Structure formats: structure tokens, C-alpha cells
Image (tube, rainbow, N blue to C red):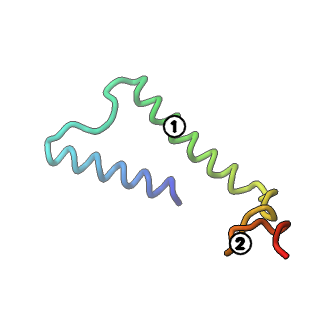
Amino acid sequence: MKTILGLLLAFAIGVGCRFAGIPLPAPPALIGAALVLAMTLGYVLTDRFAASRAATTRLLCGGPTGQPREDRS
């Protein structure tokens, strides 16, 4: 869902820049476009990988007091 919203936002910015006659806020060279694509794919893949992993340190996280569960009495 985030990817689709990102693509729609990018398309809307491109259309808005075209109608306003201002340059696109994107790199003009092919290597720059590849860099933007690589950063986007890295973000999406990291988001999917991190969301699918189990939280292994949840017990160490502080609650309302900020103290880890091991230190609470």
C-alpha cells in the first residue's frame, strides 16, 4: 500500500511540475534515476523484512514507568 501511495504521489508531483513549468525535483541523469530507484527498493524491502521478523527483545522494552520488566517488582 505504501508503494502505491508513493508512486501516486510521485506521479502527482511530476504532473504538477509539468503544468507549473518548473523543473522536476529529480536527477536528470540515468545514474541518478537508478540511485533513486535503488533507494526506493531498499526502503521497501527493508520495511517488508523488518515487519516479518519476530520482536526478540520485547521483554526488555520499558512500559509506562520506563523500567524493563526484569527490574520491575
Q: Is residue 24 left or right of residue 5?
A: left
Q: Which residue is mark 2?
A: 63
When the figure is inspected, residue 37 is found, relative to residue 64, above or below; the finding is above
Q: Quadrant of residue 17?
A: top left
Q: Residues within 10 Å of mark 2 (few under 14, many from 20)?
A: few
Instruction: Report x, y in % for residue 51.
Output: 68, 56
Instruction: Report x, y in % for residue 46.
Output: 63, 45
Q: Secondary structure at mark 2?
A: loop
Q: CA distance from mark 1 to mark 2?
A: 34 Å
Q: Residue at x 74, y 63 (%)?
A: 61
Amino acid type shown at disc 1: Met
When the figure is inspected, residue 67 is found, relative to residue 39, above or below; the finding is below
Number of numbered labels in the structure image: 2
Q: Which residue is mark 1?
A: 39
Q: Secondary structure at mark 1?
A: helix
**Of residues 50 and 61, which is closer to you in this image?**
61
Instruction: Report x, y in % for residue 18.
Output: 20, 44
Q: Quadrant of the C terminus?
A: bottom right
When the figure is inspected, residue 22 is found, relative to residue 71, above or below; the finding is above
**Of residues 56 and 29, which is closer to you in this image?**
56
Amino acid type shown at disc 2: Gly
Q: Residue at x 83, y 67 (%)?
A: 71
Q: Residues within 10 Å of mark 1 (few under 14, many from 20)?
A: few
Q: Quadrant of residue 60?
A: bottom right
Instruction: Report x, y in % for residue 47.
Output: 62, 51
Q: Is residue 55 left or right of residue 42?
A: right
Q: Residue at x 81, y 65 (%)?
A: 59
Sequence-wise first label, 1 or 2: 1
